[in-house]
Image (spheres, rainbow, N blue to C red):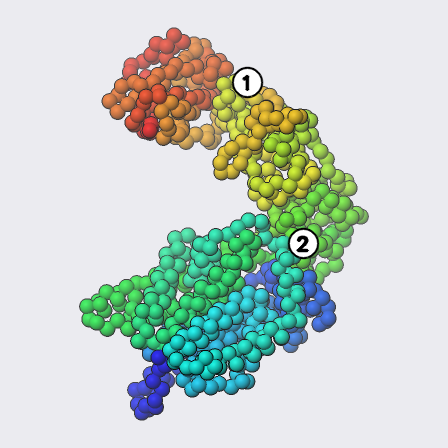
Amino acid sequence: MPANNKSQPDHPARRVVSNTGLLVVLAAVLLGVVLRLYKLGEQSFWLDEGLGMFYARPELSALFALLVGGNHPPLYFLLVHFWYPLAGESEYALRYLSVFFGVLTLPLVYQVARRFTHTGWLVGLVAVAMAALSPMFVWYSQESRMYTLMTFLAVLSAYQLLRLTDRLETQGKTSWIEWLVYGVVCALAIYAHYYAALAVLFEGVYFGVWLLARMFRRGEPLGAALRPLLFWVPSQIVAVLLYSPWLAQTGKSYEANDTYWWGTIELSTVVEQTVKSFAVGDTLLGSWGTWGSLAWAGLAGLGLLWILLRPNRLIDRVRSLFLLLWLAVPILGIYGIVANRPKFAARYLMPSSLAFYVLAALGLVCLLVAVRRRPLTYLSRPVGLGLAGLALGPALFSLGNTYFVEDFARDDLRSVAAYIRQHEQAGDTVVVLGGHLAPAFQYYYRGPLALSPVPDKRLPTLTRPLGNEVIDDLNAITRGKQRLWLVLWQDQLVDPRGIVLEQLMRNCQRLEVGQLFHGLNLLLFSLDGCTPLKIATQMDHALAANFGDQMSLEGFSVDPPVVQSGQPLRVTLFWHGTKQMEEDYTVFIHLLNPRNHIYGQIDKHPINDYFPTSHWRSGESMEDAYTFQVLPGTPPGQYELEIGVYRTPSMERLPVLDEAAKPVADRVVLTQVQVTPAQSPPTDPVIPHPLDLALTDELTLKGYGIEPTTLPPGGYLHYTLLWQKAGTSSENRRLRLRLLNERGQTIAEQLDDPTDGVYPTGQWQPNQIVRHVGAIQVPAEARGTFQVELSVTDKDGHALGSAESGSFRLPEKVSIK
């Protein structure tokens, strides 16, 4: 029911509380001002901020023409357009607009929060303090973007709706002008950011719930009960009419947006990211962020329960749904938009963060003040103080990271531009890869060099990355130039195949850049004798292997064909996309000895994770490099190099098809690779369990590994043993493996030749490290827990040394079930 609004005596104590509350609100707002102005201009502009200035600089007609090709509505850029001639173009001046709207939002938080309980003034104070200290709110108040403007307008519209429905409830009338102003504010909010429409949607849902509740509660005739629609509907018509000139562009922006990878996102992910950002921002990782988020969520959940379960303490029963809807409707609304277009960031829901802070403030006040029954106060107040500390501590930690930890700072474009300006020479040129960074880079670089964005687009198109045609663009850019500065930022998105960097690294001399830069890479190349660039196919072996009629392997090269143990091996594959693929496949390459044991391998997405097979163009050919280590201690000899393609995560291999499209295999053997001994013992033996155990006078076990530790009856237990030989004995030794049950009884036994006899121990050199990979089969009837015991024997299988000194029982237990 409405609150009792009868006038009451102006008691001195009431005036003290009121004046004190006002002072605390002013103090919280002042704190918000200080936090938002502190180090305001210290960090460099990043991509989005540079785009803002790029849009705002031209004349109005050109500004709108640029925005038509962008993905944001015009209001913020119009404000910047008229602001920067007055305030200047410095980072401080341009970000001050965001500070202004961020601070202006804080008193609105108080006005909204104080309407929900009889201790509303206290809830309002706590909510304002939370918003003032919010790492997320501070971050975006220090960024020259539209997010605080959107938040201010959306919160203003929510407050206006709450105030107007209260007046209809208590006085039965409102002003037409106020409702029309409400409609104007709704339209302006969407002109600030498209996702402000979710706040307007929530307000419409709340108005509908409020209207239905009013009808049922009052029992009025239908016409009288629906009378509030005469105010609300015109306000929405005003909003639609004001926004209609930009409505068509909104649809075009949505359809043309190609700044995200294909895929899906779960509702749980949206909720989790939103709560974390609202609670501790995006500048706190690890367990601190998790615990802080849980504490904030706990306070907000308690506040929600309080206003839902204690309606007798509310000004209006229906109003208790206001904060819940303010959170739930935008979250569900944005999930409906991004579920199959997974471009999501919690900043899109910033207006709802204020509802989160009000709920958290309600929860804290409930624990510290509202619980008055003596036994419960002994529990509620310590819990409240604990949750407050657990929530506030990580939030302050995150706020400190915002100011003082470089890892969380914006990318340092300013220093990159200054370095180029200081070291540039006549005949230089600058290439920015990806090209969508160019507007922000041009804000800082005002030098004489030509600046070429690659690709020349203001927004990245992730589903249409650079192809081989970029080589022609590079040749045109570098014609007649002596040096090239290459600025790399999100280059893996626009050039996932690495064509630009690979061509320059392969053909041109890289010169030294004497400084590192946060968030960006700057490279310098001499162009002397390296242009024109061209795709140089280094295909040593032609091939025609059709994998499942999805992708075809046209050829490969191996470098080097003779490799030392422990050294890297580079395999380059040349793919052809047979068709437009819907799945992201994984390629494996194995280095196999004659017994098919693996002595080196790599599994990865072809090209890289930024350009999986589902993004390949049908009919396009691509070069794909793999580098992996021939494992230290690999015995010298001939090894097979095999390749296959499989689905993730099922591990199902694609069949290799013959000319009649019939499956003939699930792998392809590429070639033979010769492995030679290492020149010196490895510094990193790459073994799970390093060891130094002499099993005989001449053989020392330097490490081992077994997998899996749980396997079915009849399965194979794979093992790796690393040996080192002492002395020059020419006697060949063998290895006995036993699988022992818990009573020490042998259930399986195997006599092996180390390295499968390819490289007998009599040929090992003194101090040489040698790796042996093998497997032992578990009996089909075996069950329980077992251990592996190994010992060294002579060539006839006779044990060397005593049972105690000549054997080793691995401590790891193997479960068979």
Label of residue 435 in the image: 2
Type of the residue with mark 1: Gly
Return the residue at label 1.
637
Q: Secondary structure at mark 2?
A: helix
Q: Residue at x 67, y 40 (%)?
A: 618
Q: Residue at x 54, y 25 (%)?
A: 591
Q: Can residue 716 be seen from the camera position used here?
A: yes
Image coordinates for residue 722, horizontal then vertical, percent: 43, 24
Q: Is residue 253 above or below residue 262?
A: below
Instruction: Looking at the picture, tell me which residue is in the foreground, 760 or 79.
Output: 79
Label of residue 403 in the image: none
Judge left or right: residue 157 versus residue 442.
left
Q: Earlier in the sequence, mark 1 or mark 2?
A: 2
How far apart marks 1 and 2 lie (CA) works out to 49 Å
Residue at the far front: name it. Answer: 221
Q: Residue at x 38, y 16 (%)?
A: 750
Q: Can residue 117 be seen from the camera position used here?
A: no
In the picture, residue 785 is in which quadrant?
A: top left
Image coordinates for residue 316, horizontal then vertical, percent: 37, 77
Judge left or right: residue 60 versus residue 143.
right
Image coordinates for residue 404, horizontal then vertical, percent: 48, 60
Instruction: Looking at the picture, tell me which residue is in the foreground, 264 or 475.
Output: 264
Judge left or right: residue 273 versus residue 8.
right
